Amino acid sequence: MDQYTLNLLIVGASFALYVGIAIWSRAGTTAEFYAANRGVNPVMNGMATAADWMSAASFISMAGLIAAVGYGNSTYLMGWTGGYVLLALLLAPYLRKFGKFTVPQFIGDRFYSQSARLVAVVCLIVISVTYVIGQMTGAGVAFSRFLEVSVSTGLWIAAAVVFVYAVLGGMKGITYTQVAQYIVLIVAYTIPAIFISLQLTGNPIPGLGLFSEHTASGQPLLQKLDQVVTDLGFNAYTAQGSMVNMTLFTLSLMIGTAGLPHVIIRFFTVPKVADARWSAGWALVFIALLYLTAPAVGAMARLNIIDTIFPSGPKAEAVLYEERPNWMKNWEVTGLLKFTDKNGDGRIQYYNDKAAGFASEAQARGWKGNELDINNDILVLANPEIAQLPGWVIALIAAGGLAAALSTAAGLLLAISSAISHDLIKDWLKPDISEKSELLAARISMGGAILVATLLGLNPPGFAAQTVALAFGLAAATIFPALMMGIFSKRINSLGATLGMIVGLVATCLYLFTYLGWFFIAGTNMLENVPANYLFGIPPTAFGPIGALLNFAVAYFVSMATAAPPKSVQDLVESIRIPRGAGAASGH
């Protein structure tokens, strides 16, 4: 059976499973559409949360970014995992105890203000649309290669699939679909990693293989990788970058994680407050299975690519373009891998042509610039082909990449849909709307969100993980401070919280748009996106903590200068923080 047919069979079977689950668990009420009727088991919710969380950025792009940069991009792992700890300890149980469907609903009630709720809705939509662009980008990449269509066609196919099962099932359908998607994506991610780790190190556990001996050379794998990349003018794979930017970026991802609306609403689906904590704990376990494997996947992919291009080592001749392997031919069709023969020798020169210290060696070898452009988002998907693994493994990783992108896209679209239908229409514009009409509004708004995300995904502002990192910065600067102050401070009032969110959103958006274009539209940026132009050297992806700091500061100073919240609201805050069944302390 040829590879294309195998891809169609396995990907098609997974899609049939998702649509079947959506039909079986079709939401018939708003409670089922928004929160799965609060009846999800915490273990299943943990698995669904992991799938919701491990998006195209985690599955497709993260290992690619680690492969391209090395240790410096381990910030993605540290930030995203650390954020879940913050979420489990500081937010999830308190928000579940509050007992509402959406994040803007909590903010509106806690800060006793429709204005605060509307600002929260705007923040949520901006965050979620930015995030879903990354998911649609990742889905388009996977479809383009494995269904042999263009990236734009792949995007529209992804949009159609997610439209069917997300609009039909709501949170109830999405939850059970995400459980299936988690199983698909984790199997798809780990099986190729095990094969590749065995090939390169003889160790079947990729995380341990990363620190094992490279079988072919007898050197430690990371030492061998450092050697080959520095031989081509790149920085050492294990070298550290700017600690200030690493710290800011990690912090941005951490507090952004804890403020992401589509993750938070998952904790509204469990029966009890204690289940919210257990859900977060199980989610961390399920996430760890992939995150402990990703660094090995990235490192091994980078080594495999260099070995493919320089079969006799970086000091020897590169492979002839006419003798390139089939995996390169396959990915060239998508436009995500490009070769330009700059010196006309018919060989593929792959090196860091921006490294001043390597210029003399490149000149001596007759090289006139790097000739191979590899999109970071293809590395995980191409890894099984690079390592010449069986066809069914290649098809499996295609299904896994699509499952990762679509599962998170569905969660984000539900967050947008519930904000529009429940927070804008039901609680503000038309309070007397019937449940049937509200459910219809939720489905229509989700369809509109899919269309907008797809159109923006045709020209994303970066790789999938980079685009997602921007959404984390926005969540860090807007939603996270409002939730933290809403739970842990009785003194922050509605005016302070509202102005804080506005300042955090505006400041962060302006910084992002300055370098990435207005509303991420290519060519509209005011400054080139290069380190020399950054304010204090802070890249757009690491600006989230600065926006959060501005949010906290504005909210605090405005609240201190104006009237305290009503007594009923302060009592509400106190009740959220006290466990049910706790009594007053006694003096004995």
Image (cartoon, rainbow, N blue to C red):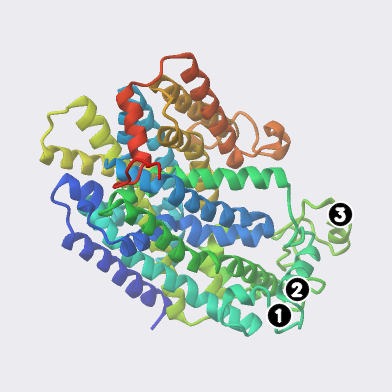
In the rendered image, which quarter contains the N terminus? bottom left
Mark 3 or mark 1: which comes first in sequence? Answer: 1
304 and 99: which one is in front? 99
Between disc 2 and disc 3, whose residue precedes?
2
Front label number (2 vs 3): 2
Residue at 22% across / 64% down in the picture?
Answer: 21
Left or right: 462 as drawn, with respect to 134: right
The mark that comes first in sequence, 1 or 2, is: 1
Q: Can residue 337 be seen in this view?
A: no
Viewer-side residue, 469 vs 47: 47
Residue 214: image tag: 1
Q: List the residue tagged with mark 2.
A: 224
Q: Which amino acid does label 2 sit on?
A: Lys
Q: For marks 3 and 1, give the one nearer the viewer.
A: 1
> Which disc number belongs to residue 357?
3
For residue 24, side relative to residue 94 (left or right)? left
